[in-house]
């Protein structure tokens, strides 16, 4: 190769490297000085491949077919700093967290949420153990904030709050909250409904079958979630194991294992099992596979369909409870992981479901830790029951419908389940 060609190649390479360095430097300056220098123009973004340029600069660059103008972001930030009346009270980190929350919320999926560091830490603690609040598992019904389930033995249950109640307004004078919930994300709802022990919050609810809204005053307390309870009942000289699973948390698999061992070793012999997952809002996906594996031997529990993959999750274990007669109790508060178990038992074993149609949450969220200690709960896929049903927003219909009458002390759903168990 002639010397001149080598010189041209060298300078060409040098110019490319310098260009990249200037681009990166521009991004750093743009971040430091916010609105004064644009992060990256739409022209640059649209003229480069996100896969190539993104790897070079270590940042996301929009694909060629998606023009994104970040100038307005820095423009608004600059206006807040320069024109806002109380600019000195602005917290830069809170502004960033707010921007990220808005970014995630714009996806339009109420189950895909960004949690700032403190909220993310609290979320992890909730799944593992205890917290201070009223004891409500939250979700949405027709995009309205709703009670998926009141947790057993909590202030919410004691106050008479029921699964399916819509939460329209929240008032807490000490926290300075007097707001409608119509625009709240799940994260905002949890943050505003929780509070210190012995403090009170007023929830304005609407319940199906009633003509008007009503207020419930709830005193907050420590919520300790005991996820698996075992009780032995008698039905016509038969011993029935009532297995109540209230959610799928960090301790559920251990608690479940202990309960199963007691059933197997119980004197006298257990004649049948009632699996009660009423008001079970779900939780860890893996727990549903573990629990189903004690009834179903070598079969598919659920199929997960993501953006780039499809996977069958099969049972694992020895199906220790496979030889016991079984019925399952569910209601409108049975969601997510509890629906996976109920649906698998119905599809794989023909087990009868007793009670009310389930909540209908057919998506899976993965918890991602981000660099600032925050977390992103992002919807990564749909889950399908073994026979191919996607129950999102529809729920799983029951074989025997029994609506609990809350004006009586009798558990009518349980009584019907025990009757069906030995038919």
Image (spheres, helix red, strand yellow):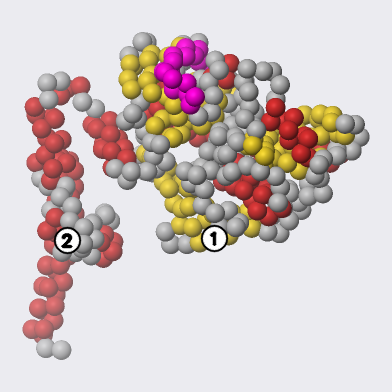
Q: Is residue 281 above or below residue 389?
A: above
- Magenta segment: does it hold 219? yes
Percent position (x, y) of residue 394? 50, 44
Q: Position of residue 383 (x, y in %)?
A: 52, 52
The residue wearing badge 2 is 46
Where are the magenta residues, as a range? 203-221
Q: Where is the C terminus found, in terms of image quarters?
A: top right
Side of 267 where 405 appears, left or right: left
Q: Is residue 410 visible?
A: yes
Q: CA distance from mark 2 to mark 1?
A: 35 Å
Q: Nearer the viewer, residue 191 or 239?
A: 239
Q: Residues within 10 Å of mark 2 (few under 14, many from 20)?
A: some
Q: Residues within 10 Å of mark 1 (few under 14, many from 20)?
A: few
Q: Nearer the viewer, residue 273 or 411?
A: 411
Name the side, left or right, on which 106 lies relative to 87: right
Residue 63 is situated, as x and y percent measured from the top left of the image, at: 24, 61
Residue 302 position within the rendered picture, expressed as x and y whole percent measured from the top left: 59, 54
Residue at 61% across, 56% down: 386
Of the image marks 2 and 1, the number of the one nearer the N terminus: 2
Residue at 81 percent of width and 29 percent of height: 233
Q: Is residue 352 magenta?
A: no
| In the rendered image, the vertical position of residue 129 relative to residue 368, given as above or below | above
Secondary structure of residue under mark 2: helix
Residue, disc 1: 311
């Amino acid at each position: 190769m002639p010397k001149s060609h080598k010189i041209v190649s060298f300078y060409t390479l040098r110019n490319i490297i310098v260009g990249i360095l200037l681009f990166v430097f521009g991004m750093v300056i743009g971040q430091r000085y916010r609105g004064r220098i644009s992060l990256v123009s739409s022209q640059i973004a649209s003229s480069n491949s996100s896969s190539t340029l993104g790897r070079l600069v270590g940042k996301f660059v929009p694909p060629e077919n998606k023009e994104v103008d970040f100038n307005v972001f820095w423009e608004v930030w600059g206006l807040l700093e320069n024109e806002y009346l109380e600019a000195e009270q602005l917290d830069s980190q809170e502004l960033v967290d707010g921007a990220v929350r808005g970014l995630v919320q714009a996806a339009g999926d109420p189950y895909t949420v960004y949690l700032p560091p403190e909220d993310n830490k609290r979320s992890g603690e909730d799944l593992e153990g205890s917290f201070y609040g009223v004891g409500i598992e939250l979700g949405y019904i027709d995009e309205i904030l709703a009670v998926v389930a009141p947790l057993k033995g909590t202030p919410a249950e004691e106050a008479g709050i029921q699964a399916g109640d819509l939460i329209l307004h929240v008032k807490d004078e000490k926290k300075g909250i007097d707001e409608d919930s119509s625009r709240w994300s799940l994260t905002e709802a949890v943050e505003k409904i929780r509070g210190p022990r012995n403090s009170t919050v007023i929830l304005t609810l609407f319940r199906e079958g009633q003509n008007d809204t009503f207020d419930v005053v709830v005193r907050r307390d420590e919520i300790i979630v005991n996820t698996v309870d075992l009780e032995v009942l008698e039905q016509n000289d038969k011993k029935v194991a009532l297995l109540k699973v209230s959610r799928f948390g960090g301790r559920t698999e251990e608690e479940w294992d202990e309960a199963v061992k007691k059933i197997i070793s119980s004197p006298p012999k257990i004649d049948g099992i009632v699996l009660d997952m009423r008001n079970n809002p779900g939780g860890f996906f893996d727990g549903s596979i573990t629990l189903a594996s004690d009834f179903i031997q070598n079969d598919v529990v659920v199929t997960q369909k993501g953006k780039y993959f499809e996977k069958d999750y099969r049972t694992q274990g020895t199906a220790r409870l496979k030889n016991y007669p079984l019925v399952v109790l569910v209601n409108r508060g049975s969601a997510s992981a509890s629906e996976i178990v109920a649906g698998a038992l119905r599809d794989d074993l023909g087990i009868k479901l007793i009670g009310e149609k389930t909540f209908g949450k057919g998506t899976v969220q993965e918890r991602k830790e981000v660099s600032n200690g925050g977390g992103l709960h992002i919807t990564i896929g749909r889950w399908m029951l073994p026979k191919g049903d996607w129950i999102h927003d529809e729920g799983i219909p029951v074989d025997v419908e029994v609506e609990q009458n809350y004006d009586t002390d009798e558990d009518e759903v349980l009584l019907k389940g025990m009757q069906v168990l030995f038919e």
